[in-house]
Amino acid sequence: MFVGAEHDPRFRAPATGDERSMLVDFLGSQRTTLELKCSGLDAELSRRAVEPSTLSLLGLVRHLADVERRWFRVVLAGQDVPLRFSSQDDPDQDFAGAVPVPAVAAAAWEAWHAEVAFADAFVAAAPDLDIEGHDAWRGTVSLRWVLIHMVEEYARHNGHADLLRERIDGARGI
């Protein structure tokens, strides 16, 4: 187990409350899960799942930094900023560029923390969950939809993180 139930920082929020609080708490728990799955690792963060896949824990951090940036900064806030790790010319660079170099890992965590902080501030300042943004893929989306999608995105990738971490050092747990 990564942490015992009595020390687990996730899922401590009330199981009742308003919609925004519940969505924010669930997303926060999923983000914390990613951090726990990566905790205590250095170069191992870039270890690939299986050939020829480029999937790694570090790649997931880089990918999720880009996902946070895309939905909250670009789609909802309307900022004209590029993704940090991938691009139209190199859409898999978030994973392919996850190499065992300390500066690469540090930059990934710095970017992820910055994007999470922006998203948290954006959600806290939003007047309601019905604010909208435009996405080329989905069309018009609401903050509500983005929060639900982000919980799903993290949950799916945290499943990958479970398997990656177990392969690295046998660590298992929720």
Image (tube, rainbow, N blue to C red):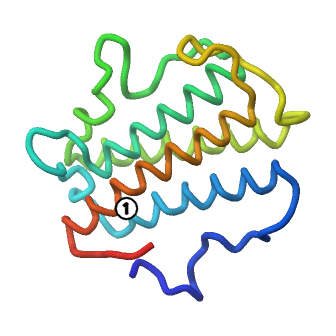
Write down the residue under mark 1: 38
Can you tell which quarter of the image residue 28 is in? bottom right
* Image coordinates for residue 18, horizontal then vertical, percent: 87, 55
Amino acid beneath label 1 = Cys
* Image coordinates for residue 39, horizontal then vertical, percent: 39, 66
Vertical placement of 75 versus 109: above or below? above
From the viewer's perspective, tell me whether residue 126 is left or right of residue 67.
right
Vertical placement of 164 versus 118: above or below? below
From the viewer's perspective, tell me whether residue 3 is left or right of residue 74.
left
* Image coordinates for residue 24, horizontal then vertical, percent: 72, 51
If the image is split into quadrants, where does the N terminus sit?
A: bottom left
User: Residue pushed farthest right?
Assistant: 127
Vertical placement of 52 versus 43: above or below? above
**Count of labels shown?**
1
From the viewer's perspective, tell me whether residue 126 is left or right of residue 163.
right
| Residue drawn at point x = 26 percent, y = 48 percent | 56
User: Residue pushed farthest left?
Assistant: 51
| Residue drawn at point x = 38 percent, y = 28 percent | 85
Circle 1: element type: helix
Out of 111 and 151, give the one closest to the viewer.
151
Out of 113 and 157, give the one closest to the viewer.
157
Out of 148 and 70, give the one closest to the viewer.
148
If the image is split into quadrants, where does the C terminus sit?
A: bottom left
* Image coordinates for residue 54, horizontal then vertical, percent: 20, 39
Counting other residues with Cα less than 10 Å from the Cα at mark 1, is it few (<14), some (14-19), or many (20 or more)? many
| Residue drawn at point x = 40 percent, y = 37 percent | 63
| Residue drawn at point x = 16 percent, y = 40 percent | 53
